[in-house]
Amino acid sequence: MTIRSEILGCGSYLPERIVTNEELSATVDTTDEWIRSRTGIGQRHIAADGENTSDLAFAAAQRAIEHAGIDVADIDLVICATATPDNTFPSTAAKVQHRLGMTQGAAFDIQAVCSGFVYGLAVADNFIRAGQAKTVVLIGAETFSRILDWNDRGTCVLFGDGAGAVVMRAMDEDETSASGGNGQGHNSGRGVLSTHIHSDGTHYDILYVDGGPSTTQTVGHLRMNGKEVFRHAVKNLASIVDEALEANNLERSDLDWLVPHQANKRIIDSTAKKLGMSVDNVILTVDKHANTSAASIPLALDVAVKDGRIKRGDLILLEAMGGGLTWGAGLVRW
Ligand code: ACO
């Protein structure tokens, strides 16, 4: 019997407060036109005072568990991808585990910034394939508003807060083939077909936070060389999508949906163009959510599953790049 992970359900949560570009331009030297034309962003959600990453993560996890129709008692692993944890320690995942009423299983955070969800997918999938976990709640949750320098117009306009989650469960590969896909063999059944992750620390200083417990004993603020990040994103994402397709003997034309990390519409357009995909097959939420780092992919996924665009059996490519640099992709048959 070959085990793979199926995604049983998803959920997401966005803080109530929406800040539009116009509203931002009252306090930051910027314009709606500049932000929209450079990034595609129109607004972002910002967490309320006292509303922390674990609150967003918990709400998204609860919704994913409900959508999946599973019992909390069945969960044996909670993973939270975040670069903005509530505290330096313990992990945000452990807080969520507690609020879910779990005392069983394990919980830990993953830190790969904007690639966090794809890294988490790889870790969760490998735990399941190795037989070390059967039911995993994987969350991407961030409150980037807390690490932005609101005097730096080059970065503060780009990010927002939010959380998304999926429930993954171990399944016999033969069973997944019977319930989805349209052919024979490894890539025909439902579930995570493969994950691919990379990092290259050479470029850590083009996107980083200038603080931390070991260096400054402060939280610090996000710093970025936007042009360099853009250049690396386009290059790395182009290579990772090819890597994912080749590993599964699939063609670009086999893909039904691209669910990219929502950093910037221009970066997403460039990946879609490389894949020869129409904009109609790209899930785009950056206009409404801005860049929510590790939360952006599960947030976008949840929007498209709940509005009926993504259906059982569809082939989905997830991809992201972020600070580190880190980048990765996952191929999933929904
Ligand atoms: N409003 C108005 N003007 C601005 C703003 C703003 N918010 N921000 C910068 N400017 C000005 C600059 O001061 C500069 O003015 P100058 O010419 O008088 O000096 C001018 O706009 C051009 O600045 P650049 O930084 O060169 O602008 P660029 O065209 O490169 O666009 C951007 C900046 C949008 C950040 C772009 O580089 C980009 O998209 N980079 C990718 C970054 C990204 O997506 N990061 C997310 C994290 S990583 C990830 O998730 C993949």
Image (cartoon, rainbow, N blue to C red):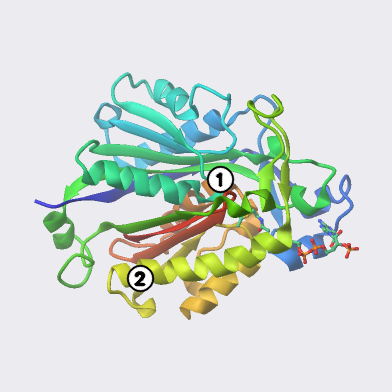
Q: Which label was assigned to residue 245?
A: 2
What residue is rendered at 33% in x and 72% in y? 246
Residue 66 x/y as whole percent: 35, 38
Residue 28 x/y as whole percent: 86, 48
- The tag earlier along the polypeptide, 2 or 1, is 1
164 left or right, relative to 144: left
Is 178 positioned to the left or the right of 239 in the image? Answer: left
Work out which residue is located at the far left of the displayed protein and give it. 1
Disc 1, ligand 1: is the CB inside 8 Å? yes
Tell which of 122 and 169 is nearer to you: 122
For the point 35% across and 70% down, which residue is it?
Answer: 245
- Residue 72 marker: none
Q: Is residue 254 left or right of residue 112?
A: left
Q: CA distance from mark 2 to mark 1?
A: 24 Å
Which residue is depicted at the point 13% across and 52% down? 2
Label 2 sits on a secondary structure element that is helix
Up the image or down, 93 lies above or below 237; here it is: above
Ligand 1 within 8 Å, label 2 CB: no
One can see residue 48 in this view: yes
In the displayed orientation, state which residue is furthest to the front: 202
Q: Mark 2, residues whose alpha carbon is within 10 Å: few (<14), some, or many (≥20)?
A: some
Residue topped by disc 1:
113
Residue 326 left/right relative to 190: right
Q: Quadrant of ligand 1?
A: bottom right
For residue 209, what is the image quadrant? top right
Q: What residue is shown at x 59% (from left), y 50% (from top)?
A: 323
Q: Amino acid at mark 2?
A: Leu
| Percent position of residue 314, x then y | 33, 66
Helix, strand or loop at disc 1? helix
Residue 281 or residue 206, whichever sits in front: 206
The amino acid at mark 1 is Val
Q: How many marks?
A: 2
